[in-house]
Image: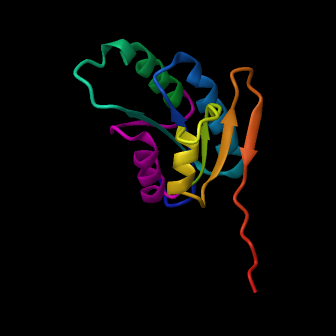
Amino acid sequence: MYSNKPSILACVTGQFDCDRIIETAAELAAERECELRVLTVLPPMADYSPVSYQLEYLNFVAKENGADMTVIFSAYAPAAAAQFVTENNIDRIVTGMHDGGNESFLVMFNRFAPDVSITMVAKDNLIYSMDVSQANVR
């Protein structure tokens, strides 16, 4: 069971190489003494067997790093992830790289949850972070 302290969320898709996202999120969680959470959002479909081995592997990687992996079934991943973040005291998400589109997961997620910092992990394991800053308005 998770505590009430802030968490780092690894947002993964059904790809084996998303293990780098979980491992980076685990390092961040350890550095910040936060909980680690892992989330994947799958679109509703009749057959999940094409991604079953990948999800089983990612669940194994999550468990190795002290986390459970939550699977949410939703047609719109950014809103589902933002709702999960809001309900689970998440202050940073870790994902793969932004694909550049104005309607991409990260752009839309940021519209739903603008107060959550984002860390992206490239396929070559370079890490990019966007931290939320609070403006002082007088």
In magenta segment, residue 88: yes
What span is in magenta? 64-89
The location of residue 53, given as percent across then percent down, is: 40, 13
Quarter of the picture containing the C terminus is bottom right
- Classify residue 20 as left or right of residue 111: right
Q: Nearer the viewer, residue 61 or 46?
A: 46
Q: Residue at x 45, y 17 (%)?
A: 54
Q: Nearer the viewer, residue 84 or 76?
A: 76
Q: Say if 77 sits above or below 59 in the image.
A: below
* Residue 1 makes an appearance in the image: no
* Residue 71 makes an appearance in the image: yes
- Classify residue 46 as left or right of residue 32: left
In magenta segment, residue 41: no
- Where, by quadrant of the figure, is residue 72 drawn? top left
Q: Say if 58 sits above or below 88 in the image.
A: above
The location of residue 30, given as percent across then percent down, is: 68, 44
Q: Nearer the viewer, residue 82 or 24?
A: 82
Q: Residue furthest front?
A: 102
Q: Residue at x 26, y 25 (%)?
A: 45
Q: Say if 63 sits above or below 91 in the image.
A: above
Q: Residue at x 46, y 55 (%)?
A: 88
Q: Residue at x 70, y 51 (%)?
A: 32
